[in-house]
Image: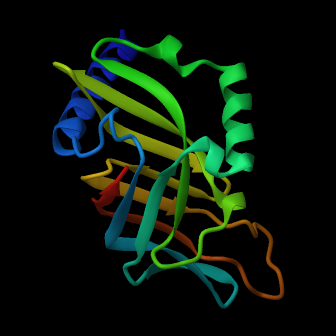
Amino acid sequence: MRNGRKLVALVAYLGAASAAGAAVDSRHPFFRSLCTDQQSTGFKWTDGGWTPASFNPSDYSVEKRAPGEDTSCGEDLAARQKLFDPSEQNMDPYSFSYGCYSVRLYAAPFHPVLDKVCWETWMTAGETTALARVDCSEGFDVISFTPEGSYNYARISSLADDHDGRKNSLLVSVGTCKVLDRR
């Protein structure tokens, strides 16, 4: 029964998110959003121990790319779809799919090898199907966002062991995204 309540809560959450994020629809599924931190906190390795830290806000460019624009993401996308068809999880009015995304600091150069395959949640209302939420969790970065709404971002360290007295910082950020363009 707990799973049923979790499902109802998830559906309610996605419904609220999609109402705010109807800027991307199935007719124009490719877009670029600017996601801006409102707050960023975490831990920094200082003098042999972790200390709480606040970080300067960052801006991220999040772009949905066509699989053909980047063969590494396209191949990964095809492999995932062979292993698991997300459409098997569809429940009216929600549908699910995978997409290729570039997530990078705003104004940083694009590197195809860094593209991620992300889980997409779409919501249909009437004749419009809008992108309600995107969840990307590959490597050491995790981002969950609505193209025109809220987002959260986390970065864990690739250096779990102490290397020359240094470790990468760990951080969690929250903020908002705004669609810059659609195609």
Rendered location of residue 43, percent (x, y): 53, 75
Residue drawn at point x = 23 percent, y = 46 percent: 23
Location of residue 3 by image quarter? top left
Give the residue at the far bottom of this rendering: 47
Number of callouts in the render?
Answer: 0
Nearer to the camera, 131 or 5: 131
Which corner quadrant holds the N terminus? Answer: top left
Rendered location of residue 67, percent (x, y): 61, 42
Location of residue 117 by image quarter? top right
Q: Is residue 30 above or below residue 174?
A: above
Q: Is residue 144 above or below residue 22?
A: below
Q: Is residue 112 above or below residue 119?
A: below
Residue drawn at point x = 36 percent, y = 40 percent: 133
Give the residue at the far right of this rendering: 164
Q: Is residue 48 left or right of residue 40?
A: right
Give the residue at the far top of this rendering: 1
Residue drawn at point x = 24 percent, y = 53 percent: 149
Q: Is residue 154 left or right of residue 58?
A: right
